[in-house]
Amino acid sequence: MSAVTTTTTAVAAPAAAELPQVRRRRRLSPGRRLPAARLAGPLLVLALWAAASAAGALDPGAVPAPWTVLRTAGRLWTDGTLPTDVLTSLRRAAYGFAIGLTAGVLLALASGLSRTGEALIDGTVQLNRAVPTLGLIPLFILWLGIGETFKIAIIAIVVYVPVYLNAHAALSGIDTRYVELAEVQGLSRAAFVRQVVIPGALPGFFVGLRLAVTGSWLGLVVLEQINATSGLGYLMFQAQNYGQTDVILVGLLIYGVFGLASDSVVRLLERRVLSWRRTLSS
């Protein structure tokens, strides 16, 4: 009986030794998304700013404390100055962004779906991209005057260029096998655009949209300091003349909040629309 047991153990031991060892798989992905992760950086900067101000490491005349800036913002809001300027800036940015977005999408579709359209449009847009948009301000003032029209036109140009470039690149990068499959399936032009072109171009379009949102705010900062009588940029320009650093910081912080909020909205929209994609950011 003991001999049988010994023999069985001896046979089982090599069999167990021959089993392949299971290697632990390394996780290469960034991991799960953290809630409100993008607020961590700004909050850290705010905390360092507050700590340096409280410790006296910052000159209050050059960089006021956060609570000073907050009091200034409350005062400007109470006397009605800040709400008027904020609404004016939002209106300018919205008009320019809507015009630029529409133009960028239409031009990208016309250029990406037609060789004739590409020949007529793409070179012109590339030439426009090579010319600094803000360098067009003096010319647009002569053409359109110093009112609202030239400001909206410049913002529209700032917006349409990244939208067009990224959407056109996405359209040009669609795999030709999908086009051949659509032809074999006998899809109409409208069905081809709806089922192949739009899904294929959406990732690039959202990249351009995020750049356009940021560009609209950057352009607005500059434009509102040129022959303007209202808006956040005008408020900051007037504060510069009187040495009011706290008012300038109020304007900059509002611009930053608007930029972060609009970028977050685009990111959220992108995740919803492109929920079918499996990416590292998903």
Image (cartoon, rainbow, N blue to C red):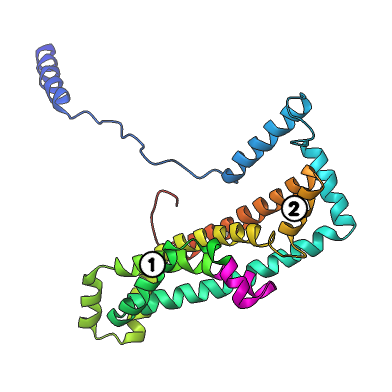
Q: Residue at x 49, y 76 (%)?
A: 103
Is residue 119 found left or right of 42 in the rendered image? left
Q: Residue at x 43, y 40 (%)?
A: 30
Note whether residue 167 is visible: no
Question: Where, by quadrant of the figure, is residue 40 drawn?
Answer: top right
Q: Position of residue 211 (x, y in %)?
A: 50, 58
In magenta segment, residue 140: yes
In magenta segment, residue 275: no
Q: Quadrant of the N terminus?
A: top left
**What's the amino acid at mark 1?**
Gln
Q: Position of residue 85 (x, y in %)?
A: 77, 62
Q: Are marks 1 and 2 in contact (CB under 8 Å)?
A: no
| Of residues 129 and 28, the one drawn nearer to the viewer in this rendering | 129
Instruction: Please tell me how many numbered marks the rendered image carries.
Output: 2
| Residue occupied by mark 1 | 126
Q: Secondary structure at mark 2?
A: helix
**What's the amino acid at mark 2?**
Met
Question: Where, by quadrant of the figure, is residue 226 drawn?
Answer: bottom right
Q: Which residues are magenta?
A: 138-156
| Of residues 162 and 59, the one drawn nearer to the viewer in this rendering | 59
| Residue occupied by mark 2 | 236
Q: CA distance from mark 1 to mark 2?
A: 34 Å
